[in-house]
Amino acid sequence: MQQKPKAILFDWDGTLAETRSAVVDSMEYILKRYGKEPWDVTKVKYRDTTKSLKENFVNFFQEDAPRAYQQYLEYYEINGYTKIKPMENADVFMKLCQNKGIDLYVVSNKERKLLLKEISYCFPDMKFKKVLANGDAPHNKPAPDPVFVALNDVSYPINTKNVFLVGDSKQDTECAFNASVFPVLLGKGKFMDDDYIKMKKQSDEPLLVVDTFADFIRLMEDK
């Protein structure tokens, strides 16, 4: 593994926090309310994986998308927080990084109101230098905009030596590649194409894959 970075940017859902059950429950609720197919079917048939969940609502609900999205948010805000939890050892990893003088950021496509509430719930004592949510940059991930907006006040070059972006999806890794920062895939990329992961790991712009934060801690301890 390369030298210690100056900044680490984290995705939120599936990276710092386990939120999938909250998202799935909320999607099942709103899909059923509109007489749509279950989430396992909908996400395969209609989801554009290059776009955020919000941007996909028009694929799921057509002209009802704005209203359906607001109802989804309302349901999630009431019911979702009982289902989320911090990713194991995420807090240990982040404290290690802060002790090494590494600035920490969150760059998520999630709505700001939900994101801030979840961060406060999962990591009440953690201080992030900046938190970016849906709409805080001109374009969401996988566009590079969130990286550049988050780091718009740094004095060092934004490159693979100075900046890591940690996530669990192709949106995150492609955002890192597009911004020319170092991509770290947390987990086995279970929602990603294995050939894509293999290709990127062997490319000139290597993708680092770590199974868990415990593994990441071991890599960072000597930096």
Image (cartoon, rainbow, N blue to C red):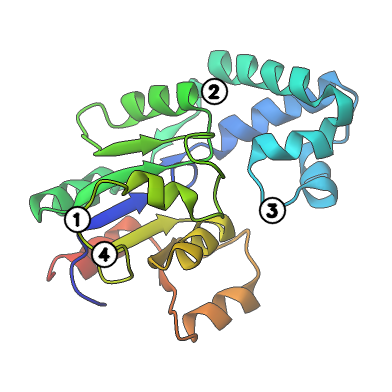
User: What x and y, as percent, mark residue 164?
Assistant: 33, 61
Q: Quickly name the residue at label 2.
A: 80
Residue at coordinates 39% horizontally, 51% vertically from top-left?
A: 148
User: What x and y, as percent, mark residue 177?
Assistant: 48, 68
Does the rendering let one see residue 210?
no
- How far is disc 2 from disc 4 in space, using C-alphas? 38 Å
- Element under label 3? loop
Task: Write down the quadrant of residue 174 in the picture.
Answer: bottom right
Residue at coordinates 88% horizontally, 26% vertically from top-left?
A: 63
- Amino acid marked by disc 2: Gly
Does the rendering let one see residue 39?
yes
User: What x and y, as percent, mark residue 114?
Assistant: 48, 24
- How far is disc 3 from disc 1 in space, using C-alphas? 33 Å
Q: Please identify, in this view, whether the residue under mark 1 or under mark 2 is nearer the observer.
A: 1
On the rendered image, what quadrant is the C terminus found in?
A: bottom left
Is residue 221 toward the left or the right of residue 208 in the image?
Answer: left
Q: Please identify, in this view, whether the residue under mark 3 or under mark 1 is nearer the observer.
A: 1
- Element under label 1? loop
- Element under label 4? loop
- Amino acid marked by disc 3: Thr
